[in-house]
Image (cartoon, grey):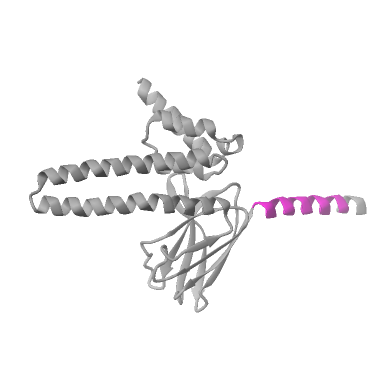
Amino acid sequence: MNKFLSIIIVFLLVISCATNEKQMDLSGNVKGLKKGTILLQKIEDTLLITVDSVTIKGNSTFSFSEIIEEPELYYLYVKLENGIVRDDRIAFFAESNEIIINTTLKNFEVDAKVSGSKNQDKFIEYNKIIKRYSDQNLELIEKGYIARQNGEDSLAITIEKNQKNIISKKYLATISFALNNNDFEIAPYLMVSHVNNSRLKYLDSVYNKLTPKIKDSKYGKALESLIQSRRKNEIN
């Protein structure tokens, strides 16, 4: 009997260790939040679902424990005491690790500082690169609007051409980033979420360069499915 109990205990310990290896311990602070609810969410079957929530009453710190089978994009939302959900949200790559997110209620998304996730580090690096193109595009949108208001049609046409050039550069920068980070889950994620309508040859190039582990990930499989769908449509 004692031997049987020992086997059971060892078995349970093995399961516990395996579970802990896949667990994300998420904690942080939302400065300025006195009362409300913090929602932990993710996309499942194209729908945004809430996987957990924490009620805040006076203490603005929060914590979640979630089993993460593989790195995946999650979101933090805030629902205020009156039931209103803020428009901004924090998107971050969840991983089986200790992750810390500190931010403010006033600038919930912009002020967010995330640490503890390798894919998130890459995501931050990518966003810094892309911000340059986004800022340039916003400037051109404003200039184009002023040109049309002033009846300067030729200038407006030139600005539109420059906008298309900026968008092309943004696409190429995303593809280049994915190619250079082929051993991270963020690579296929960017292809299916940010440049899914790019040329098939670019989607193929990134997918073929992914490591076997990343090809077998959620976003790797999503990229493979996208390529197959695009190829089928081109044949038809």
Of 208 and 95, the residue lying toward us: 208
Looking at this view, name the residue that lies furthest to the left: 151
Quadrant containing the C terminus is top left
Q: How many marks?
A: 0
Q: Does 52 sit left or right of 159 as displayed?
A: right
| Residue 138 magenta | no
Q: Does 137 sit left or right of 216 as displayed?
A: left
| Residue 16 magenta | yes
Give the answer, above or below, for where 1 lies relative to 114.
above
The answer to whether residue 139 shows anywhere in this view is yes
Q: Residue at x 43, y 39 (%)?
A: 175
Prevailing SS of the magenta stretch: helix
Give the answer, above or below, for where 49 lies relative to 193.
below
Q: Does 199 sit left or right of 4 as displayed?
A: left
Image x and y of residue 203, in percent: 44, 33
Looking at this view, name the residue that lies furthest to the right: 2
Of 107 and 158, the residue lying toward us: 158
Q: Residue at x 40, y 43 (%)?
A: 194
Q: Residue at x 42, y 60 (%)?
A: 89
The answer to whether residue 219 shows anywhere in this view is no
Q: Residue at x 38, y 61 (%)?
A: 88
Looking at this view, name the residue that lies furthest to the bottom: 58
Of 140 and 62, the residue lying toward us: 140
Image x and y of residue 46, in percent: 43, 45
Image x and y of residue 152, in percent: 10, 48
Give the answer, above or below, for where 98 lies relative to 172.
below
Tell me where the magenta segment starts and ends, as one range: 6-22
Image x and y of residue 20, in percent: 69, 55
